[in-house]
Image (cartoon, helix red, strand yellow):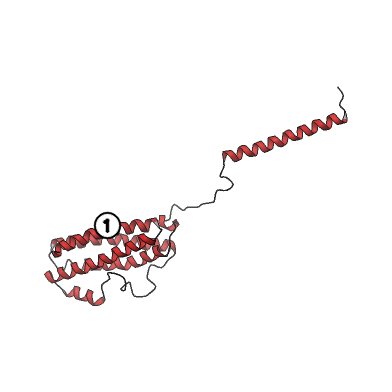
Amino acid sequence: MSFTHNSIRAALLIASGTATILIAGCGTDSDAAHPDHASAPTSVTSTSMPASSVAQHNSADVRFNQMMIPHHAQAVAMADLVAPRTQNVQIRQLAASIKKAQQPEIDQMTARLRAWGQPTELADGHGGHQMNGMMSDDEMSKLRSARDAEFDRLWLRMMIAHHDGAVAMADAVLADGVDPATRELASAVKIAQQAEIGQMNTLLGQ
């Protein structure tokens, strides 16, 4: 069988077109199997870091954690004053419960701020004394000097005010914060401390 120049040229063109279709078809199959392969963003999450360290957070989240650390620390200090100064079993139990809950939360907030690369202390240098519910040095000194029924009354009133401040701080970060772990902590603080406020008001006879 003999081939003319034109027939050979036509055969080559057909073969070339077939190869092009096959190559294009392979590319389409690959893209269909992995539709997000080319456009998917790269995301690296370290499983060794706290969840909050890789989550989105804003200035309200940072501020809440920085403020709540000294706020909780003062509540723990007030709880430590109870045992040597009163025999009231209910107040002793409440103080122990406050200390048991708030010290781990201090540790949690400290770790969160460090993971964010943020200072764990407030920049104003006042140790948090200007925030809602914090007792002044004079008030703490008066509480340390009190005993028995007088101490019970002072401690309950001061701790109610202290808890009211914590609830207000929780409300603020729940309104403006975005970090899931911080919002979860704020919700837990609000629920627990509102319940304790009710308990303390009962003890005061209000």
- Residue for point 30% across, 56% down: 188
Q: Where does the image place residue 177, in percent across and percent down from the top left?
A: 39, 60
Secondary-structure class at tag 1: helix
Q: Residues within 10 Å of mark 1 (few under 14, many from 20)?
A: few
Residue 144 spot, x, y in % from top left = 19, 73
Given residues 147 and 37, the one toward you in this image is 37
Residue 196 quadrant: bottom left
Tell me if 36 is positioned left or right of 206 in this view.
right
> Residue 10, relative to residue 140: is it above or below?
above
Instruction: Return the residue at label 1.
Output: 191
Q: Is residue 180 above or below residue 21?
A: below
Going by the numbered disc 1, the residue's amino acid type is Ile
Looking at the rendered image, the quarter that the N terminus falls into is top right
Q: Residue at x 26, y 58 (%)?
A: 192
Tell me the residue at 34%/67% (across/down).
67
State which quadrant residue 51 falls in: bottom left
Residue 183 position within the rendered picture, expressed as x and y whole percent measured from the top left: 36, 57
